[in-house]
Image (spheres, rainbow, N blue to C red):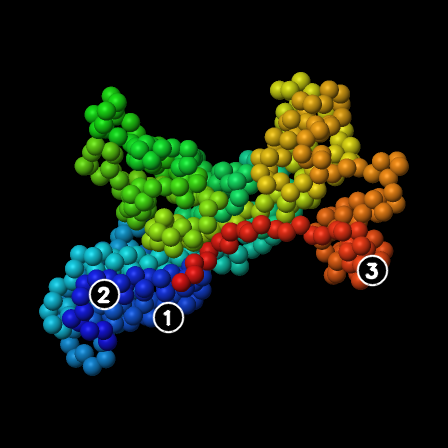
Amino acid sequence: MSDPSAPADAVAGRLDELAGRFVPAILRLDPFDVDRIIDRLLAALGDALGTEQIVFATTGDSASCRDVREWNHPGMMTPGPEAITIPITVGGHRVGVLSVGERPDGRRFSSEVREKVGMLADLMALAVQSGEQKLALERARSEGRRAAEVPPAMMIDDGADSIDFEDIIGDSGVLRVAIGRVLEVAPTDASVVLLGETGTGKELFARAVHNRSRRRGRPFVRVNCAALPPTLIETELFGHERGAFTGAVAMRRGRFELADRGTLFLDEIGDLPLDVQAKLLRVLQEGEFERVGSSESRAVDVRVVAATHHDLEAAVHEGRFRMDLYYRLNVFPISLPPLRERVDDIPRLTWFFVNRRQRALNRKITSIPPGVMSALQQHSWPGNVRELENVVERAMIHSTGDTLWLDDGPLMHNWRPAAEDSTLEEVERQHIERVLRRCRWRVNGPGNAAETLGMHPNTLRFRMKKLGIERPKKPVVLEAGRLSA
């Protein structure tokens, strides 16, 4: 057991270390492992505080129904008086309470220690809540919702589901996985974090979550946190009263009020200043906020869907993003695939953008040459779907007839069709590269490039080495739901 006479800053340091140890376990939580994690955390908390008893109680379906978990120091005969009592609220609803017994020496806990104990209490409540949500998702799967099969992403005119998945075009396996995650989490009220590179369609997926939820008849409000200066983010989110600052000539409601009973999409949440992060955490925990210039608390019921292309894990370790806000938001992360991993979707996406812009650009494109489509599929697309849309629109402006031609830009310089006087080696190299890309650079296994080309895998490797063909390196991709200690 820790020395009860240890200074407050040493106790606070031990509590920070506790959070760092247990956050990864909470984020990867097996729903059937909740009790063991809570018991371990209570014992570690009691040891760090130098107390003899801790009680953690969560509210069930009714206020009188509680699940009580208790830790007592070995050898304690009778429970002593409480030193800290922390009510735990989520979304404005009380979900439990954490009680810490007095120290044997009777010394009081500092305000810093009390605050950190409150953070750990929230962590335990999150473990219970996360476990319940995961069990609910497992029940939904076992009941065979939608025949337990993830449907393909729909085109704009694909019938009834086109409202929910409007503009999410493609049928690749990685896209199906992301849509399957949307189908799992949308019916719940769990917070969602969309992880992916710029241009992967995070707002479209946020709308899909909203449209599949019970809040679909209520507002969907979007805030781009990176587009607002730090001085305006707070008033944009929470609103302000008349006279709150110079230029505030009238009361203004913030985005949280506008999204009441609906969904708030916080795009690029990694760019939020730390002081605003603290206020956002309060809204998520208590369901209350104050307008700038007001002391009156206002209740709000909002589901938050956040998105970022930043590595939030690194931001937490660097002190740029609050750990407690991270694990409060990161209940259900969804990774969105970059376009370079969805090569098979590029033809459908290209025709979708062509058809959508035909009338506005006064064009009637009816054909796309194989060479143009091959060039599109060979590009690395650092800007993802948004870049493809811009390239297609530029090509439509460049094309004057009924055939889509790319302009003579960098994208065409990276691909050259074999001319009539090309050498046999050049033709062979281009053909092998096209087959490798179509087979996702698989040389062995089912559907591999060697089988398609009708040669032995070792022969293909030899030809690749001789022709100087190398698989392009993939950039680092964010890994969802992982926080190293």
Which residue carries the number 1 mark?
36
Residue 153 in the image: above or below residue 49: above
| Image location of residue 382, percent across then percent down | 59, 41
| Image location of residue 241, percent across then percent down | 23, 28
Kind of residue indicated by mark 2: Ala
| Image location of residue 155, percent across then percent down | 63, 36
Q: Tell me: 40 left or right of 203.
A: left
Q: Gap in Å between the C-alphas at discs 1 and 2?
A: 27 Å
Q: Residue at x 42, y 56 (%)?
A: 133
Residue 459 badge:
3
Residue sitting farthest toward the bottom = 75
Disc number lying in front (1 or 2): 2
Please say if the residues under marks 3 and 2 sit with CB atoms less than 8 Å apart: no
**Please, what secondary structure does the residue beneath circle 1 have?**
helix
The tag earlier along the polypeptide, 1 or 3, is: 1
| Image location of residue 132, percent across then percent down | 40, 58
10 Å crowding of disc 3: few (<14), some (14-19), many (20+): few
Q: Gap in Å between the C-alphas at discs 3 and 2?
A: 64 Å
Q: Residue at x 22, y 68 (%)?
A: 49
Kind of residue indicated by mark 3: Thr
Residue 347 appears in the figure? no
Please say if the residues under marks 1 and 3 sit with CB atoms less than 8 Å apart: no
Q: Tell me: 476 left or right of 260.
A: right
Residue 381 badge:
none
Query: In terms of image quadrants, where is residue 3?
Result: bottom left
Quadrant where the image shows the N terminus: bottom left
Disc number lying in front (1 or 3): 3
